[in-house]
Image (cartoon, grey):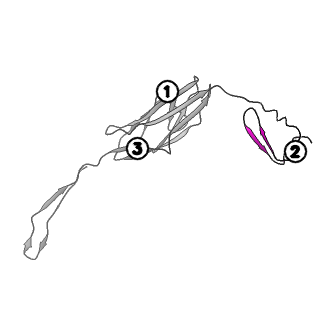
Amino acid sequence: PSTTYSYKIAYGTLTSNEVSVTTSDPMPFIQFINDGAIELCATIGEMSQDVEVGLDTWYVDGDITISVGMPFELSVDKNNWNSTITLSGEESHFYIRLRGDAVGEYTSSITATSGVCDAEPLDVTGVVSQPSTFFEDFEMEGTDSYSAQDYIGDAAQWRFSDVGIWGS
């Protein structure tokens, strides 16, 4: 709360007028603490890895409601997941993940609100895709078995050194 300070200066028989100064009420503040954009990915039928998001608050005494759009989910304990959670003023982080219910690209904003202020929203994106599999047969001819090899396969480029998988 605001505070009033009063003072006067006296020296010998001289005394100044009394001066009063009143400070303003502290400004409550909520801010997400995160290193860069939140980008999540999941395969259909699975959940993405969860990402921890920090929360910095000043002069917020009550609960803070954190919300995000589906198919994203939030949790305080990594056990109970919902699109809306409530943090006490002392809690400083929560987790977010992406539900892999339907293939697609998703965007939403994480919001934080208390009775006294709101945070600037934090954007989150996610992609749910079909599981992908690949097969590399590593068929390469004309080299001895322990030569360093670069192999360009169907899914990736591979670098082999001293592996002994090719015949001479």
Specify which label sits upstream in the sequence, 1 or 3.
3
Instruction: Specify the farthest residue to the front.
Output: 142
**Could you say which disc has been placed on residue 70 in the image?**
1
Looking at the rendered image, the quarter that the C terminus falls into is: top right
Q: Are marks 3 and 2 in contact (CB under 8 Å)?
A: no
Amino acid type for the residue under numbered disc 3:
Gln
Q: CA distance from mark 2 to mark 1?
A: 50 Å
Q: Residue 113 placed where, x, y %?
A: 37, 36
| Front residue (pair 84, 61) | 84
Give the labeled residue for mark 3.
31
Q: Residue at x 76, y 41 (%)?
A: 158
Q: Earlier in the sequence, mark 3 or mark 2?
A: 3
Q: CA–CA distance between discs 1 and 3? A: 22 Å
Other residues around mark 3 within 10 Å, as few (<14) / some (14–19) / many (≥20): some
Classified by dominant secondary structure, the portion drawn in magenta counts as loop
* Image location (x, y in percent) of residue 26: 28, 49
All told, the count of numbered labels is 3
Which amino acid type is marked by label 1? Answer: Met
Q: What label sits on residue 164 in the rendered view? A: 2
**Magenta span includes 145:** yes
Tell me if 2 is positioned left or right of 153 in this view. Answer: left
Mark 1 element type: loop
Residue 8 image-quadrant placement: bottom left
